[in-house]
Every structure is written in structure tokens, then in C-alpha cells.
Image: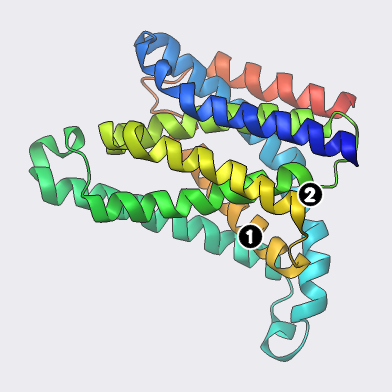
Amino acid sequence: MMTKIVLSFIFAIGFAIVHLCSKYLSYIKKSLQSKFLSFAGGVAVSYVFLHLLPDLSHYQQKVGKRLNHGIGHYLEDHIYLIAVLGLALFYGLERLVKNSKKKKGGQSNYEEVAVSSGVFWVHMASFFLYNAVIGYLLIREEYETKWGMLFFFMALSIHFVANDYGLRKDHKQKYDKYGRVWLTVAILIGWGIGAITVVHELIVSILVALLAGGIILNVLKEELPDDQESSFIAFITGLAGFSVLMMLV
């Protein structure tokens, strides 16, 4: 257990470094950025379909025991409905951000205008929870192999870089000044909670399902760029490479 705590703390620090340094992706030329985002999309899709979605069936058993009565009896796939709700919530937040930019900048130049402070903090609050859950799972997840934590770290580190890229595009200097710091703190807080206590399994199951929905949306939104910018070869390389790694261990 002590080895897991130490290793997970090292990876938590690694997540923090990724958040703090991901802004330097903007200094890389556009073509390489697009290839990296496509590669990140491949890795994230592989992680979602080979690990995260199968993992939801494990959480379904936990949620099913608690909700399999009353109205819950008619909702056989509770955990998947919660994941759909997570996707819908994060989609709603994305629309809130886009609409704020439209209102502030007008139709012609809204993409170049940062969103309002209120929308910024609502957006950061959602990703704060998102990152805190990931930090908690880093130490409390039941990994199938000794390599499981490493692959968890690899997949989500790449996902974080792509997420940061999108958040910086939406919020500009505000994200670099405040957002990335808050999301770094969230990872460490989530890890700290996991280190000192065990959150009730029903709460964790619901949060993981919401997280799954959020990751799926963010993969579709940010890590699979527009057709004219994406690289199919980079996407397939990330998808195939990470899938082979996960199946070999």
C-alpha cells in the first residue's frame, strides 16, 4: 500500500507539472499542434473504450445495489444514464461558453474574445471537480496490473494537455493566470482526499460516470480537431499504439 501511495503521489505531481507547463504547446507551430491533438484523440479514445467504459460495468454493480428499488428499478443501466448526464452537463457548459463569447464580441469576431468572469468560474468549477475525481482515482483505483497506474497517468496526461489547449483558447490569459493553477490544485486535493479517506462507493460511482461522460465529450470536442486541421495518421498511431500497450499487459 505504501508503494502505491508514493507512486501515486509522484504521478499526481506529474499531473500538476503537465497542467503548469501545457501552455508551451502554443509555442509549437500549428501543424505540429494539430498532429499532437489528433494523436491525443487516438490515445483518449483507446482509453475510453478499452478501460473507462468497461470499468463502468463494475461501478454499475455498485450503483445497481443502491438504486434497484422504487423508480430506480425501472432504470436498469443507471451508471450509463449518469454518464450520459455527464456528457450533457459538459456540453451545456461548452454552449454557455460559446454563447458568452458571442454576446460579448458579436457574431463577426466572438472567437477572439474571452468569456465573462462568471462563465469562466463556472467552467473552472466543473473542471475542478473533474480533476479532483481523477486525482482521487489515481490513488484509489483498483488497477488490474502493476502497469495500470502508469497507463492511467499516460492517457490522462495527454488528455490534460489537449483539455488545457481548449480551455486556454476559450479563456485566454485568465486561464493561464488562474485556471491552470486551480486545476493543478484540484488534482492534489483529490489525491489528498484519497490518501486519507475512502469516499462512499456510491458517490465515487456517480462521479466516475459523470467523469466518463465529460471525457467522451472532451475527446470529441477538442482532441479530434476539424477535418482541415486533423491528422488521421497521428490519430491512428495514438489509437493503435495505446491499444496495443493496454492489451499486452
Give the mark nearest the N terminus, 1 or 2.
2
CA distance separating discs 1 and 2:
13 Å
In the rendered view, would you say 63 is above or below 204?
below
Does 90 sit left or right of 213 as displayed?
A: left
Q: Label 1 amino acid? A: Leu
The mark found on residue 125 in the picture is: none
In the rendered view, would you say 238 is above or below 85?
above
Q: Residue at x 38, y 40 (%)?
A: 179
Q: Callout 2: helix, strand or loop? A: helix
- Mark 2, Cα crowd under 10 Å, few <14 / some 14-19 / many 20+, is some
The residue closer to the viewer here, 35 or 22, is 22
Percent x, y for residue 27?
36, 11
Q: Residue at x 70, y 83 (%)?
A: 72
Q: Which residue was labeled with disc 1?
A: 207
Q: Residue at x 47, y 60 (%)?
A: 88
Quadrant in the rendering for residue 119: bottom left
Percent x, y for residue 107?
10, 43
Percent x, y for residue 108?
9, 37
Q: Label 2 amino acid? A: Arg
Q: Residue at x 75, y 49 (%)?
A: 195
Does 32 sit left or right of 201 as displayed?
A: left
Q: Which residue was labeled with disc 2?
A: 140
